[in-house]
Image (cartoon, rainbow, N blue to C red):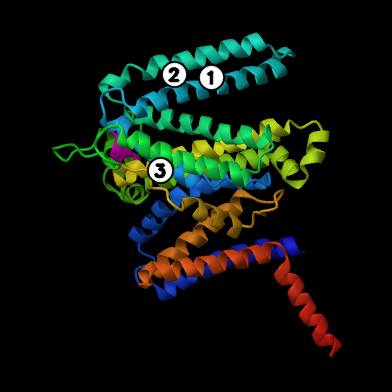
Amino acid sequence: MSRIFRESFLYISVVAVFAAGCLAAPGFLKPDNQSAVLRQVSQNGILAVGMTLVIITAGIDLSVGRMLGLASTLAAMLLVEKRWTAATYFTVPAAAVSAGILAALLAGAVGRSRLGLRTRTMQFAAFLAAAAAVGLWAVPQARTGFSILSVLVLVPLSGFLLGGVSGVLVSKCRLQPFIVTLAMMTSAYGAARLIAASSGSGYIHSLYDSQGNVPPGVDSLRVIDAAQLAGCLPSWTPRFLSRSLAEGTLRSILENLPVPGLFFLLCLGAGMFILNRLRFGRYLYAIGGNEETARLSGINVDGVKTAVYAISGMLSFLAGVLACAQYRQGKPDMGAMAELDAIAAVVIGGTSLMGGRGRMMGTLVGVLIFGYLTNILSLRGVSTDVQLFITGIIIVAAVLLQEGYIQRLTSRLRFYQRGK
C-alpha cells in the first residue's frame, strides 16, 4: 500500500506543480517557456539517468558535474583547435580504448550466446580492431579540425573510460563510492583546468572565431532547422508533410523542441529499456537489494557495478558536449554543483538511496518537478538563495516520504488520537 501511495503522490505532485505554475506564474504556459524548461532540464535529466542506474545499485556518483565541465572543455578545444592539443592527446586514446573495451565485451557476449564459448583471442582481436578503427578515424582530424559528429562520438567514449575507472575502484578495490567519486570529481576538475590552460588562451574556450562564427554543425545541437530538414526529404515524401515541415504547423512544433531535450528523452528511453527489458537491469535491482546474495546467485557483481559507473561517466560527457554547444563555450567549472541537482531529481523521483528501488519514469517526474519549480520561482522573481533553500526542503521531504517516515508518523498520530 505504501508503494502505491508513493507512486500516486509522485504523479500528483508534478500535476500540482504544473497547475501552480499555470495559476501563479505569468507566461508559464507559453510555448517558448515550455521549450526553455525542456532545454534547462535536459542537462540535469541526462545526468539523472546515469545517476539512477548508480543509485539503484546502492552507489553514488559525485563526479558527474565536474565530468561535465571537463567534457565541455574537451569539446570546445576539439572543435576550435586545428592542431594537436592536450584535449586531443586526452580524448583520442581514451576513446580508442573505450571502443576497444566495448567491442571486446560484445565479442565475449556473442561468443557465449552463439558459439558456446568465450574466446580470449576473439575478444583481444575485437579490442585491437575497434581501437585501431577509432584511432585511424580520429587522428587525421586533429590537423583539419574535428567535426561535431566526431566530438559527439569521441568525447562520450572518453567519459565511458573515466567512469569505468571509478567503477573498478568501487567494485574491485572495495572502496566506498562516495570517496572514489569525490576523488574523481576533484581529479576531473583539475584535469579540465590543466587541459584548458595548456592552450595559452585561458580557462574559458569560446566557439566563436574572429568573424563571430561557430564551427559547422554546432547549432544543430541547439535547435532543429526544419527548413533544412525539409530540403533533405526524399522525393517520394507526401506533399502535405514536406509543406508542413517547410512552412506549416510541423515546422513551428519542431522549432520549439530543443535538441538537448530530444537527447534527454532518448537517454531516458534507453534507461527504461535497460531496467525493464534487459537482464542487466534485473541485476542492478538485485545488487542494490542485497549485494552478497546477488554475488552468491552467480551475478558478476563487479562487472555490473563497473558498467553502471562507466555509463554514468559517458552520459556526463554527453551532457558536457551538449552544454558546450548550448552555451557556445567550454570551461572547467561549467558543471559545478550539477551532481546535487541530479541526485535531487533522482531522490524526488522515488529512487531509494539505500538501493534496490527506483524507476526511470520516476526520474523523469523528478526532473520535471525540479525544473518546473525552478522555472516558476524564476518567473516570480524569487532569488536564487531562496530557490536553493526550498530545493533543500523538498529533497528532505522526498527522502522522508520514500523511506516511509511520514506514513509511520501519521499512523502514530492516529493511534495516539484513538487512545485519547
- Horizontal arrangement in the rendering, residue 141 relative to residue 121 (left or right): left
Q: Closest to the observer: 220 or 393?
A: 393
Neighbourhood count class around disc 1 (C-alpha, 10 Å): few under 14, some 14–19, many 20 upward: many
Q: Which residues are magenta?
A: 217-221
> Alpha carbon of mark 3 to alpha carbon of mark 1: how far?
25 Å
Mark 3 or 2: in front is 3
Q: Is residue 80 above or below residue 288?
A: above
Mark 3 or 1: in front is 3
Spot the residue most to the right. 419
| Residue linked to disc 2 | 134
Q: Position of residue 60 (x, y in %)?
A: 61, 47
Residue positioned 36% across, 29% down in the render? 87
Image quadrant containing the N terminus? bottom right
Marker disc for residue 111: none
> Alpha carbon of mark 3 to alpha carbon of mark 2: how far?
24 Å
Q: Amino acid at mark 2?
A: Val
Q: Earlier in the sequence, mark 3 or mark 2?
A: 3
The quarter of the displayed image where residue 15 is located: bottom right
Q: Closest to the observer: 65 or 254?
A: 65
Q: Earlier in the sequence, mark 3 or mark 1?
A: 3
Neighbourhood count class around disc 3 (C-alpha, 10 Å): few under 14, some 14–19, many 20 upward: many
Q: Position of residue 103 (x, y in %)?
A: 56, 19
Q: Amino acid at mark 1?
A: Gly
| Residue linked to disc 1 | 100
- Helix or strand or loop: what does disc 3 sit on? helix
| Residue linked to disc 3 | 69
Residue positioned 51% across, 21% down in the render? 97
The quarter of the displayed image where residue 201 is located: top left
- Helix or strand or loop: what does disc 2 sit on? helix
Q: Earlier in the sequence, mark 2 or mark 1?
A: 1
